[in-house]
Image: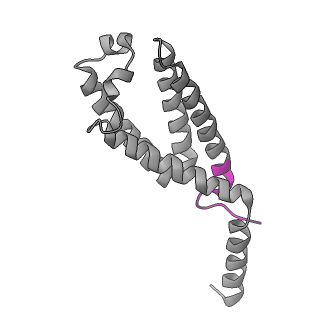
Amino acid sequence: MTRADVSTSRTAWSNARSDPAYQAFLLLRTVFTVAPILFGLDKFANLLVPWPGYLAPWIDGIVPGTAQQAMYAVGVIEVVAGIAVAVAPRFGAWLVAAWLAGIIVNLLTFPGFFDIALRDFGLLVGAVALARLATRYAPGWRTS
């Protein structure tokens, strides 16, 4: 790599860092990496909330085992989704969006959680925005 290449690369990086869309990409990527991992890990500890209480009774009736055991599976999926966003945001963001869609369906099928379903819809929109931004800003993007 020549000095001119290094200089051009530094200029491109500096321009990208000052780009509001790139900043939005970094913010969304960070949040959708950290939050699923933390919430996924909490499915094993139930420190934040008693997670089995968020599982719709009809889903609890069709999955094998207890609601807590179902939450263990949910936790693993959430951790994997967070790692996918960190490693491959173009794919991981769509995985998180699909997962949130499933959570929304779960929450809308029994009373008392409609407000959380609405919040998760906002998160789903954020995950889709990340997926769209990742097509431009994910590792390997080029400015030419």
Q: Is residue 115 left or right of residue 9?
A: left
Q: Is residue 18 left or right of residue 25?
A: right
Residue placed farthest to the bottom in the image?
3
Query: Could you tell me how many numbered marks the image carries?
Result: 0
Residue 122 locus on image (x, y percent): 61, 33
Q: Quadrant of the N terminus?
A: bottom right
Tell me which residue sits at (63%, 35%) in the image: 125
Tell me which residue sits at (66%, 59%) in the image: 23
Q: Is residue 90 above or below residue 52?
A: below
Residue 17 locus on image (x, y percent): 68, 67
Q: Quadrant of the C terminus?
A: bottom right
Tell me which residue sits at (51%, 38%) in the image: 96
Residue 114 inside the magenta-drawn segment: no
Q: Nearer the viewer, residue 12 or 121?
A: 121
Chain part drawn in magenta: 133-144
Residue 135 inside the magenta-drawn segment: yes
